[in-house]
Amino acid sequence: MTKQEVKWMKQQIKENQLPKVLHSLETSLPSSIQLLTDTDIRQELLNRHQRAAQQYKTEMTTILLDTVDAKLYESRKLFDDEMEKLWHDQRTLSPNQRFNQTTIDLIEDHLFLFTEKVQYLSR
């Protein structure tokens, strides 16, 4: 998942547009509550049910966002580790096994452009 997708998801949640899986909680009202004839008790239980469902949605949303942030961090760390390994390998290989300077320049140029695009999309 990209940083842009994370920002989009957070914006959706701020606008109270929850993921579809969390919307199903609204309809899962126990039928036994609806069968109560005492309207005061029924209303109290309905209110408690709605509060519990909202708390659950809030907690699940937080877990979802934390999971997305963790995945984003893991992806970034993996990328950084692989790049570090690439450059370490280039320094330790014999000169005839290393990338030539043109290839290194191309990699660095593409990496710079890629980073610029990601930063632009993250705004």
Image (tube, helix red, strand yellow):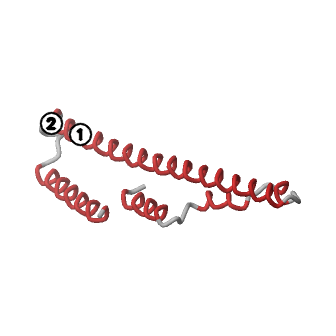
Give the side of residue 96 with respect to residue 50, left or right: left
Q: Quadrant of the N terminus?
A: bottom left
Q: Quadrant of residue 11?
A: bottom left
- Mark 2 or mark 1: whose residue is earlier in sequence: 1
| Label 1 Cα crowd, 10 Å radius (few <14 / some 14-19 / many 20+) | few
User: Residue 110 appears at what percent x and percent y?
Assistant: 21, 58
User: Residue 59 appears at what percent x and percent y?
Assistant: 55, 48
Q: Secondary structure at mark 2?
A: helix
The foreground one among 20 and 106 is 20
The foreground one among 37 and 17 is 37
- Compared to residue 88, the image places residue 71 above or below, namely below
Q: Quadrant of the C terminus?
A: bottom left
Q: Looking at the picture, which amino acid does disc 1 mark?
A: Glu
The foreground one among 28 and 108 is 28
- Compared to residue 4, the image places residue 101 above or below, namely above
Q: Looking at the picture, which amino acid does disc 2 mark?
A: Arg
**Residue pictured at 61% horizontal, 49% vertical:** 56
Residue tagged 2: 91
Disc sitting over residue 84 in the figure: 1
